Amino acid sequence: MTAPAPAPAPAADARVLGLAHYAARGVLERVLARHGLTFQQQILLRAAVIADTPPTADDLVVQVQGFLKVAEAGVRATLGELVARRLLVADGAYLRPTDAGRELLAVTAGEVAPVSARVWGGIPAEDLAAVGRVLALVTERAEAELAAMG
């Protein structure tokens, strides 16, 4: 007796993309929660840490709004939370990550790395390249639709 054929992979669509996003984000959010950090705080903190030059609050707001498609007021509130926790510090018009902010980001990244390796490991390079091309095209088209919506 032969084994049944494996079920065909689902076609990529918005639902499949969303399910993958939220599954991966769920992993990240559990790690972040152990350190009292939210997803949006982590995105803002990372943007400040990896910036080539110290960003202003406005720079970070624009960048994170572009990433997350969220309201300006929420991003500014999150910036305030990071400053209040001393993970970011004002230096004139600029915001700089503190040593504590850099350390927290490094610790959470270190905890997520082995999980990410298990999730992404073993996927053939050509499959990853194909998915990358498709997701880049979907992102480009969705960004164009958002721009057209005003």
Image (cartoon, grey):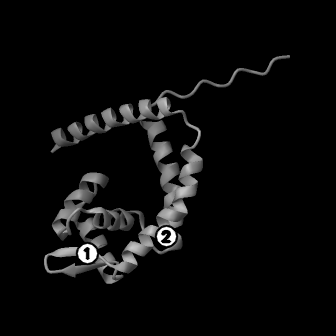
Which comes sooner in the sequence, label 1 or label 2?
1
Image coordinates of residue 128 in percent, x first then y, are 47, 35
Among the 4 quarters of the image, the one containing residue 57:
bottom left
Residue projecting furthest to the right: 1
Element type at marker 2? Answer: helix
Q: Give the side of residue 117 with respect to residue 14, left or right.
A: right
Q: Residues within 10 Å of mark 1 (few under 14, many from 20)?
A: many
Residue in the foreground of this view, choosing between 147 and 118: 118
Element type at marker 1? Answer: strand
The residue identified by callout 1 is: 96
Q: Is residue 13 visible?
A: no
The residue identified by callout 2 is: 107
Whether 108 is drawn above or below 70: the answer is below
Whether 67 is drawn above or below 55: the answer is above
Tag 1: amino acid:
Arg
Position of the N terminus, as image quadrant, is top right
